[in-house]
Amino acid sequence: MYRHVHQENFEQKDIPLVAHTFQEIVVDILSYKLLKVAEDFAISHLGIVGGVSANKRLREKVLELAGKDKETLRPVKMSYCTDNAAMIGVV
């Protein structure tokens, strides 16, 4: 992505599209892997926690893919989605 953004013919107006595309790719991979692990190991309750869990699109996608099993997913409140680096820095 860095290489794409720094090409001579890249325009500033393309930055939001590149950022959105990158987010969608990451969300697709994370949500797929999360639900695959839950299925493979017969996990009945799954928490979505940590800094990355604050990403609204990730939350939406995981709940969308979970479908009828939404009750097994437990995203924590946004106020608990903190950055681990900040917590470590306090220690």
Image (spheres, rainbow, N blue to C red):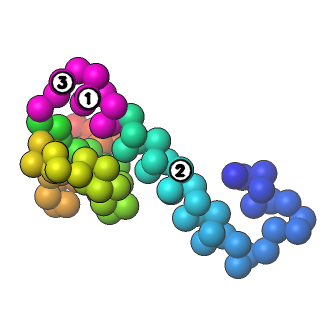
Residue 21 horizontal/vertical position (percent): 58, 60
Label 3, label 2: how far apart the Cα atoms are: 26 Å
- Between disc 1 and disc 2, the foreground one is 1
Residue occupying image coordinates x 38% and y 34%: 33
Tag 2: amino acid: Ile
Q: Which corner quadrant of the image does residue 19 belong to?
A: bottom right
| Stretch of the chain drawn in magenta | 34-44
Asked whether the residues under the numbered discs 3 and 1 touch, taking CB atoms below 8 Å apart as contact, a structural biologist would say yes
Nearest to N terminus: mark 1 or mark 2: 2
- Between disc 3 and disc 2, the foreground one is 3
Tag 1: amino acid: Glu
Question: Is disc 3 surrounded by few (<14), some (14 to 19) or many (20+) residues within 10 Å?
Answer: few
**8 above or below 71?**
below
Asked whether the residues under the numbered discs 3 and 2 touch, taking CB atoms below 8 Å apart as contact, a structural biologist would say no
Residue occupying image coordinates x 12% and y 42%: 72
**Residue 42, disc:** 3
The residue that disc 2 covers is 25
Label 1, label 2: how far apart the Cα atoms are: 21 Å
Residue occupying image coordinates x 16% and y 45%: 69
Label 3, label 1: how far apart the Cα atoms are: 5 Å
Q: Is residue 10 magenta?
A: no
The residue that disc 1 covers is 39
Q: How many numbered marks does the figure carry?
A: 3
| Residue 82 visible | no
Residue furthest out toward the right? 8
Q: Is residue 5 left or right of residue 59?
A: right
Question: Is disc 2 surrounded by few (<14), some (14 to 19) or many (20+) residues within 10 Å?
Answer: few
Residue 73 horizontal/vertical position (percent): 16, 45
